[in-house]
Image (cartoon, rainbow, N blue to C red):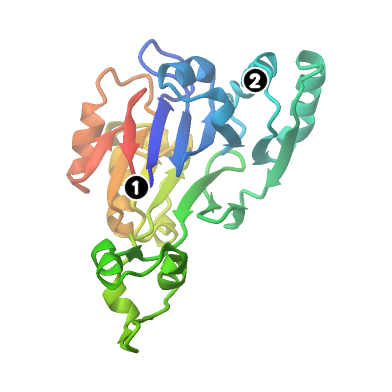
Amino acid sequence: MEPFRVHILGCGSALPTLRHYPSAQIVEVREKMFMVDCGEGVQMQLRRCHVRFTKVSHVFISHLHGDHCFGLIGMISTFGLMGRTATLHVHAHESLEDLLQKQMQLFCRDLGYEVVFHPIDASRQAVIYEDRSLTVETIPLTHRLPTCGFLFREKPSLPHIRRDMIDFYGIPLSQIQNIKNGADWTTEDGTVVPNSRLVAPADAPRSYAYCSDTRYMPGLHQVLKGVSTLYHESTYGEDNLSKAEKYNHSTARQAAMVARDAGVGQLLLGHYSSRYEDENVLLEEARKVFENTRLSDELAVINV
């Protein structure tokens, strides 16, 4: 099965601490590297997790609070210093485009590669990236300014060839793709071997949902039904529910309620408030509602 995993670069919230970096992740799908949010320190974290700078092709920014995007201009500058030539695509709210252009004019002259900006509408669910194996779509969220999450979803793949059957019937390599696409095989004596005997079922498509800063949304689970892995912000515990409501954030328990109602495979907590010196209190709170919950932490690699 092709790799589909998440590299945690930062999982803290707005106030810097010595324990956590601001929000940033790398979503690795079939050797393609997508960055989700780009907080300060992201370049150092890329080095620590051994993700090659040249592999990052798209950056998705959930919203324009600094702890989710202050690392972007520095990373763009460094890419230029390293001699990058491949285009970098930035997906973010339209209000970032003018500011980013001015920053690049001031700090990134003679960049050597193109930065293409793609404005996104955080208020609606829509596919904003697609290739042969993957789609990325926005997930509207509720925060203090326009905010969206991102849903990475594999496309269904072709079935697996049964090597024993291919060898038994002496089927040439030139016919394997046809069989993957549903063709039967006819032997030299005219016997038709049905396709079902020649293939094994395809792997089930995997999916990863990133829900950054948001207040608890009772209907969010409908968008996330059956997601393999869900990252949902859990800035506070229930002991600070009033702060969560005031600042449009979620508690760990509320994140677990979304995971439970959506029937996801596993839940990752993150975006921790600096007031918590030990996030296990958030983990225990969430697991009372949804057992298959884990804490995200810097440099962790999670298989989707």
Neighbour class for label 2 at 10 Å: few (<14), some, many (≥20)? many
Q: In this figure, which residue is indicated by the disc labeled 2?
A: 79
Q: Using the image as rendered, state which of residue 177 and residue 72 is in the foreground.
A: 177
The residue depicted at 62 percent of the width and 32 percent of the height is: 64
Q: Position of residue 99 (x, y in %)?
A: 76, 27
The answer to whether residue 200 shows anywhere in this view is no
Where is residue 27? Give x, y as percent: 46, 38
Q: How many marks?
A: 2
1 or 2: mark nearer the eye: 2
Q: Quadrant of residue 169?
A: bottom left
Residue at image x 71%, y 44%?
A: 119
* Of callouts 1 and 2, the N-terminal one: 2
Q: Quadrant of the C terminus?
A: top left
> Is residue 170 shown above or below 42?
below
The residue identified by callout 1 is: 229
Q: Amino acid at mark 1?
A: Thr
C-alpha span from label 1 to label 2: 30 Å
Reply above or below: 109 against 24.
above
Q: Is residue 114 left or right of residue 199?
A: right
Q: Position of residue 224 (x, y in %)?
A: 40, 57
Which residue of the protein is positioned furthest toward the front in this rendering? 188
Q: Position of residue 229 (x, y in %)?
A: 34, 47
Q: Is residue 72 visible?
A: yes
Position of 211 compared to 165: left or right? right
**Identity, as a three-letter code, of the amino acid under mark 2:** Phe
